[in-house]
Image: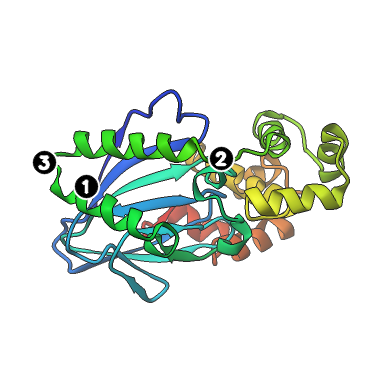
Amino acid sequence: MRTQLYAILPQLQPYVRSICTMECDGEADWSQVRVLPDACVELFLNYTDTPIAMIAGQLYRRSIISCRISRPAEVQMRKGSGCLAICFHPGMAYPFVQMPMYLFKDTTVNFFDIGNNMATELEEKLADLPDHEKRISMVQEFLLAQLKYGRQDLQVTYCLNQVQHSHRAVTVSKLAAETGLSQRQLVRKFQQSVGLSPKEYLGVCRFINSLQYLEKYPCVSLTEVAYLSGYYDQAHFIRDYKHYAGCSPGKVATASHILF
């Protein structure tokens, strides 16, 4: 599979983590990988006649929204398929989708079911454009237009920034106190914008941090990775990997078909 990253417009950078093209041109008819959760929502826009992917055994022929926020997904791309992938920062797809994100938790839905004629029109325009640069430009203009009608929850955004930039363990009670919300109110807001409760989100973030240590320090022991990532003991570390990755930390570290 070939991927190419592209620059993101400054206005979209607070919302969009990455924009890339993905093209499957290998020799095999199908290429299968396991993609681990990252608390992000991704929009995959199809610009070919080939089905975009098979996810968890279901074939998707058109553009899709993948909400792989707390569970892994088995993904197969077919030879000849091509798409443009927009990955949103955690909680930042909500202003564009304008629907409660808990409805999509750990699911994949057809973009047409949400965008209706808008999705069809976007696919047709992308297919007609001669190169990826023009496709990227058009999609970013589309996102900017959608953003005009979106809503961003500033209290949730504050919490997400605190979790991302804090060097200490963050608790749900601390986030609630700093935003002036009750824990019940905070849960409701998180589920609306992120698709997870604050506790679930903190758990996914700890797992993601451990993946970053695995990638950055391949020679460090798994016990040390668990400690650096904020796990209390090895048992919790292994339990999370079985939950979020479907296998042990050791297998994640060595398997070539697991992407993170």
Number of the front mark, 2 or 3: 3
Q: Residue at x 73, y 48 (%)?
A: 189
Q: Is residue 176 left or right of residue 214?
A: right
Amino acid type indicated by mark 3: Pro
Q: Identify the residue position indicated by label 1 in the image.
A: 126
Q: Residue furthest top?
A: 10
What is the x, y in percent for residue 121? 27, 53
Upstream in the sequence, badge 2 or badge 1?
1
Q: Identify the residue position indicated by label 2 in the image.
A: 213
Q: Residue furthest left?
A: 130
Number of the front mark, 2 or 1: 1
* Image height of 13 relative to 260, above or below: above
In space, the residues marked 2 and 1 are separated at their CA atoms by 38 Å
Q: How many marks?
A: 3
Callout 3: SS: loop
Q: Identify the residue position indicated by label 3 in the image.
A: 130
Callout 2: SS: helix
What is the x, y in percent for residue 216? 49, 36
